[in-house]
Image (cartoon, helix red, strand yellow):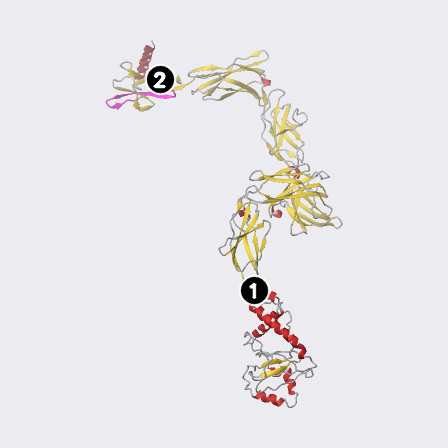
Amino acid sequence: MSRAWTLFTAVTVLSVQLCTGSEHCVIWSSAGPAVQLGSSFEMYCTFDCKCQWSMFIDDVRKPQRHKQLNSTTIYYNVANITKKRTFSCQCMCNGARDYPCGMDISAGYPPERPENMSCIYQVKDNKRRVVSCTWNRGRDTFLWGNSVLWLRTGYENHTDRPVDYKVSTKGVGWSSANIPVSHSVEWISVWVEAQNRLGSAVSIPVNYTLWDIALPSTPALGQPGCFSRECTIQVKQSVQTPHLEIQYRAEERAWTSSPDVFLQTSGTEMLQEGVQNCSISSLEPYTLYHFRARSKFSTGLWSPWSANIPSWTQEEAPAKELDVWFAESASDFKSLRVYWKELNISAARGRIVEYKVQVDGQSSGSVFIANLSAEARNHSVPFCADCEVKVWACNSRGPSPPARITSHHTQVKVQQVEPPQDVQVTADNRSSVAISWRKRATAAPPAAYVVVEWYPEGLKLEELRWVRLGGNDNHTVVTGIKPFECYEGAVHVFYNDSSVSRTRFTGVTTLTSAPEAGPSVQETVEESQVTVTWTEIPRSQRGGCVTKYTIYLEVGRKQPQLFSVPASERTHVIKDLSPAGYSLWMTASTAEGEGRAGQTVHFFIQLAALMLMVLMCLYHVPAVKHRLWVYFQCLMPDVVPDPANSKWAKECTQEKGKMMNFKLQLSDSIVTEEEEEPVLVDVEELPKPSSDVSSRVLIPETQPAPALYPLTNYIKSLSHDSDSSDHTHTSLDTNTTVDYISSHGLGNMEEEEEEEEEEEEEEEFAGMLGFFPTHNIFIDPMEFGGKLTLNAVKIDCSDFFLSEQ
């Protein structure tokens, strides 16, 4: 019967189409145009032509293997359909294709029962009332469908008939519908019927009393007018409600409800119909607040929140003193550098426009005042022992309370208390360290507050940072520590204005590596020692805290000699170096190890410097001193005067009858004015024969008598007393021996013998060591054994180094 009915339908449709002449085939489905996903059915095609028949699915280029029902109809079995498909049939006669016939088959599910029905009663104004309902359609049907919302209204003892409102639906999710209602409606009953081509489903009816679901419109806020601690806001409502809530919050804070308008609006001022003036108090000065509002009837629901409206409260003078600290320069004890931190918004109570720094003396009054810009964070001020430093922050409404500074060396009355014990510094991570300490049990007064300061090594004035803590605190965590940077600092415990203790810490770093470079070295050589000075490695190449320096001193190719120097030193002296050429370089070390070597410098220790030192020491020996003086006289280029102009020659001219012989002797010498060389004579010293003869001149004989002393080629100068007449016997011929009788007589014979002994000692000593002065020869007076009266002496040094006979 089913197939017969199908054939009847096909024949009927074909007859109609053939009558109209529109197509030569008819296509239909045994399950209709929409089927459930995963189902099976048959597709049929009936033709009016006797040619070749074909059936296609989606792609008309690939014919399907169909079956033939009769002489005019073919069919195709579709199994487990998973999506929407398009089926078509076509007839081909004599190689020509006829127009195809086709049909779209939709696949999906019948609708599920709608769930989670929810409705609200929106009171738009005094005239417009709307019931808005939402529901969940359930799973996606993959088919177009309709949802019909049925609404039955009632008031007093009367009930209206249901009214339907259709809503087109597809897909998964929520659907909604708005239905206007009269203001006289008291209760409603609602349900939803979902429909598509595969079926329908109806939800469970839900009943509401309208005022239980009444929802007023969202209030509208005007721009607030604010003082320093209070703001007034205009609130506009389309329908007056008995409840109005206004909330406010500062940036990054939680919302706070205003207690003045949370429950009732009876305290608000009604400006006009629907407009109220609401006051919000307990606010903070100079703070950006955001405001919002919502309203509610006596029953029902709160309206949605209004949009956020921002506004600033006005300024007040700062309520808190600045957090100040100071740094004392290691070289300048005439000034302090004062530092301060910026106040937060709540403490500043306004925009800071300037800072004021003042130094007051107890007896001299104000000695320093400076007004600084709002960007300033430190300033250098002079100090005196009885002075007090004050710092203020100022905004448009006035200054803050003064912050006072007590320096360790500016206040004479400051009493140093035993410092805190066991200061421990531990790196927490790459950018922070934990600092802890323990207060001494002997500290009498309780601590008022604690200040922990830290800064990169050597940059106290430039990058000082600190934190102020309570008196009972014993640890803190400081952040912003740069890796591979060495820090130092101190823990200051203040017990009162005149009692403070301090413990320093050094060598703080989070990450450490060996130095990337060595120190820059400069050497200074002095005799047998070298002074090494160096500069610090650039901070970017230190790798953390330097623990020590190492000096490498190399001579030749021998193993270098090492000198370890503390990290705090910048100079080192190496003594007692032997004469040689040296190479020197340095390295720096951290906790991770020794770094790279710096540049190499070369220097020499000279032998001459050592010899000069020995000469200066030996010059204290009298015999050596005498021989050196004679040696240097030989090297002097000064012109020696003629002995004829000496004092003894002038005295000889005064003796009658002797001048002629003197001239005759002079005539034997061939001397011209052009000759510049003086005549050298041999001088021989003879002992004094008798005490009654003071002096006399001896005429040389043809055969000179044997000399008591060895002959020398120099003229010996002796000084004589002013009241005695001395005669020096001189020969113009260098081969002539002249006897000389010393004016000192026999009494100086012992001195001459002593001189001879000294000369012998001198020769032995000089033969071993040479001539070595021990101190400045031009400062010490020269001493000689005999005294001559020649004004000047021409010395022939040709035989100076000849050995004596």
Nearer to the camera, 48 or 590? 590
The quarter of the rendered structure image containing the C terminus is bottom right
**Residue 788 spot, x, y in % from top left:** 64, 78
Q: Amino acid at mark 2?
A: Ala
Can you name the residue that lies furthest to the top here?
1
Regarding mark 1 in the picture, which secondary structure is present there?
Answer: helix
Is 324 a magenta residue? no
Q: Is residue 138 left or right of residue 678?
A: left
Query: Camera-side residue: 293 or 724?
Result: 724
Q: Is residue 339 visible?
A: yes
Q: Name the residue nearer the viewer: 52 or 340.
A: 340
Q: Which residues are magenta?
A: 76-99
Which residue occupies the foreground of this view, 734 or 319?
734
| Residue placed under numbered mark 2 in the picture | 79
Q: Earlier in the sequence, mark 1 or mark 2?
A: 2
Report the quarter where the N terminus lies.
top left
| Percent of width and height locating residue 673 | 55, 85
Front position among marks 1 and 2: 1
Residue drawn where x is 38% and y is 21% of the image: 84
Q: Secondary structure at mark 2?
A: loop
Residue marked by disc 1: 611
Residue 81 included in the magenta stretch of the image: yes
* Residue 615 higher or lower than 326, as above or below: below
How far apart marks 1 and 2 lie (CA) works out to 121 Å
Q: Assess disc 1: are there few (<14), some (14-19) or many (≥20) residues with their C-alpha within 10 Å of its C-alpha.
A: few
The crowding category of the residue bearing disc 2, from other C-alpha atoms within 10 Å (few below 14, some 14 to 19, many at least 20), is: few
Q: Position of residue 674 (x, y in %)?
A: 54, 84
- Amino acid type shown at disc 1: Met
